[in-house]
Image (spheres, rainbow, N blue to C red):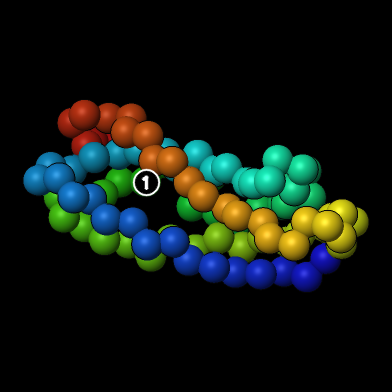
């Protein structure tokens, strides 16, 4: 399959530093087994200083065996805070 790259924008809206991990979700569920992340910010913990914004890249491919009735694949992330102190 062809490789694609996109960027997600994330911003720390708090007044303190934080460390967290982004957990991906692919929908519809049928598409998840056909979706392969090559490079992803979700592979590592992310640190954000107070008010900091980041552009976070993802490189992926979609298996050409994806059923033809799946015309839209949605990739989303939930960011979970790991460290209240913000250190690493």
Residue 72 as seen in the image, left or right of residue 11: right
Query: Tag 1, which secondary structure?
Result: strand
Q: Nearer the viewer, residue 31 or 18?
A: 31
Residue 30 location, quadrant: top right
Using a 10 Å C-alpha cutoff, classify the residue at mark 1 as few (fewer than 14 neighbours), some (14 to 19) or many (20 or more). Answer: some
Q: On screen, 42 above or below 85?
A: below
Q: Is residue 38 visible?
A: no
The furthest residue to the front: 69
Q: Nearer the viewer, residue 29 or 23?
A: 29
Name the residue: 33% across, 30% down: 82
- Residue wearing tag 1: 46
Residue 51 as seen in the image, left or right of residue 29: left
Q: Is residue 86 visible?
A: yes
Name the residue: 57% across, 42% down: 25
The total of numbered circles placed on residues is 1
Percent position of residue 86, x then y: 22, 37
Q: Quadrant of the C terminus?
A: top left
Name the residue: 18% across, 50% down: 13
Percent position of residue 72, x then y: 68, 60
Q: On screen, 42 above or below 82?
A: below
């Amino acid at each position: 399959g062809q490789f694609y790259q996109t960027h997600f924008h994330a911003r720390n809206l708090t007044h303190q530093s934080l460390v967290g991990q982004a957990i991906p979700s692919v929908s519809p569920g049928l598409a998840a087994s056909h979706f392969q992340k090559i490079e992803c910010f979700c592979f590592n913990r992310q640190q954000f200083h107070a008010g900091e914004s980041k552009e976070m890249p993802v490189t992926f491919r979609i298996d050409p065996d994806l059923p033809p009735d799946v015309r839209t694949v949605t990739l989303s992330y939930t960011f979970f805070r790991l460290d209240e102190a913000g250190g690493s």
